Amino acid sequence: MARGKKDSDLPKTKLNKNNLKRSMRLFSYIGPHKWKLILGMVFLALTGATALLFPKLIGNLIETADFSLEDINEKGLILLLLFTAQAIFSFFRVVLFVNVTENMLSSIRQDAYNTLIKMPMAFFSGRRVGELNSRIAADVGQIQDTFTTGLAEFLRQIIIVIGGIIMLFFTSIKLSLLMLATIPIFALVAVFFGRYIKSLSKQAQDKVAESNTIVGETLQAIADVKAFTNEFFEIRKYKSTVLDIKAIAIKGGLARGLFASFIIFCIFGAIVLLVWFAVRLQYQGELGQDDLVTFILYTIFVGASIGGLPLQYAQIQKAVGATERLFDIIDENPEQIEEQANVDRLKGNLSFHNVDFAYPSRSEVSVLNKMNFDISHGQTTAFVGSSGAGKSTIAKLILRFYEPQSGELLFDGKSASKYSLRELRQQIAIVPQEVLLFGDSIKQNIAYGNPNASFEEIKHAAKQANAHDFIMSFPEQYDTQVGERGVQLSGGQKQRIAIARAVLKDPVILILDEATSSLDNESELLVQDALEKLMKNRTSVVIAHRLSTIKKADQIFVIEHGKVTSKGNHESLLRDEAGLYHKLIKIQTTQNV
């Protein structure tokens, strides 16, 4: 399964009452499958119990060596039945835990994605897409691994440790006390080495993340790297981080080697000590051969389980951390977007009354200041101004991606807050400067404007957008895959797909956010022709960069420092030689000469 991070890179969370209580919410997603979990726990207990019976039965088998062949066969058959039962219990335990986990994760994935997709734009402006994707992929994957095998294995090992120690004392109290006396020494050394190795691992992970960032950024901006001939600069930068990773990893390897050597020495030392003491007890007649074998097997079982507990515990820690991060998303406050079959169609009148706005991520920087304007149904209204004046922000507020800090936005004389988000956005379409298409077919990308549209309606929209001819020139025509973010199409082709999508949506209000600013002359003519068809009989809001495209606008608002400083049509604004509009026209005319 593809994941944003390796499991080993996922942070571990210290377990406490609060995060454990929060993690218990996972069980609320099990729903009608609770009985499967209970049954799985029963089979888990049975697998632990059968594992604990094995050393005892082996000892009994050895004890029958001095008895009849019939007794030996009987004990051997009992052992065979024990293994058969354990295999059956393990099968049902795994099947039930997987079933419960997958049903639970299916609901969690849906809840997390449903919340994410409904979050307001302010939420995404402060977060990386890769981080959010990681939460859906890596964190859910960590929970999946833990619930499918990790948690069950942790509980099974706990059963074996507790049950095994009890059985050890029943077998030989003296040997059990000697064995338990060595555990604190191992534990102290393991904690010391463990913390040191963990610190080195964290340093290595940070450096690996840094190197991955370099790779990601340079490959995404490969055109800039080559244009500035900075290949060797990037190579040196990457080499530096790789060498740091190597140094830390070698240091960590040395620590792991010392730790492994100590553990091996201690384990074999403890075995020699126990065997020596057991032989003494056997010589003194305090321990039988069958009890010795039983004790050794229980010791191996308990030792192996204790050795596996830190790994399983660490996996549970990661799962708790993953659960917290997922619930951080699920507990966010999404936009209230309800499905509506039919909405009352707007007329298309639009007004801003004393609107003040600053982006949440830059609340100290005011973008719009007492913004006022009125747009009537069917009018084409253009907004012009220098970069950063607030033109594109107006488009985002019309779509209600953000809410103004003060003032009011009106649709048909009614406050925007009186409409549902879906009711408004269903009747507004935007053709942006940077068109991002989905990695699907051309047909599906156009149909995004109206998923219920027929193929004939999709073709009609493409013809209206001057896109049909170039689409038909492709071997697969409307089934042509556009590639990730539409990489297979040119800028002009993507713009016409976006226009076709808007045609299919049949909006009341159309927003054109510098839709032709990055196109060559030939593409601009085709796109401009398609836009003029689309703008007929609609309220059109044009965010203009190329002022030559808005000469036919019914009204033009000039924006400076978040305010409307002048308004009129092209001719009237051009006559004001001291105005910003005249200056911008003059600059662009000079640049085009």
Image (tube, rainbow, N blue to C red):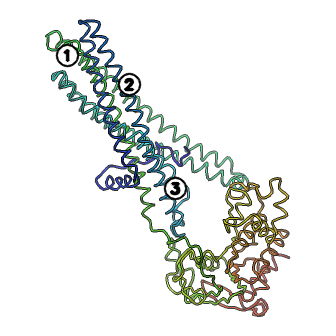
Residue occupying image coordinates x 43% and y 56%: 325
Q: Amino acid at mark 1?
A: Phe
- Which residue is at the front of the view, 439 or 235? 439
**Disc 2 designates what residue?**
84
Q: Amino acid at mark 3?
A: Glu
Residue 182, percent from left and from top? 23, 27
Residue 118, percent from left and from top? 52, 66
Quadrant containing the C terminus is bottom right
Q: Earlier in the sequence, mark 2 or mark 3?
A: 2
**Disc 3 designates what residue?**
131
- Which residue is at the front of the view, 370 or 138? 138
**Disc 1 designates what residue?**
277
Residue 367, percent from left and from top? 57, 80
Circle 2 Cα neighbour tier, 10 Å, few/some/many (<14 / 14–19 / ≥20):
few
Quadrant containing the N terminus is top right
What is the spatial separation of the Cα atoms under label 2 and label 3, in whole angstroms? 46 Å
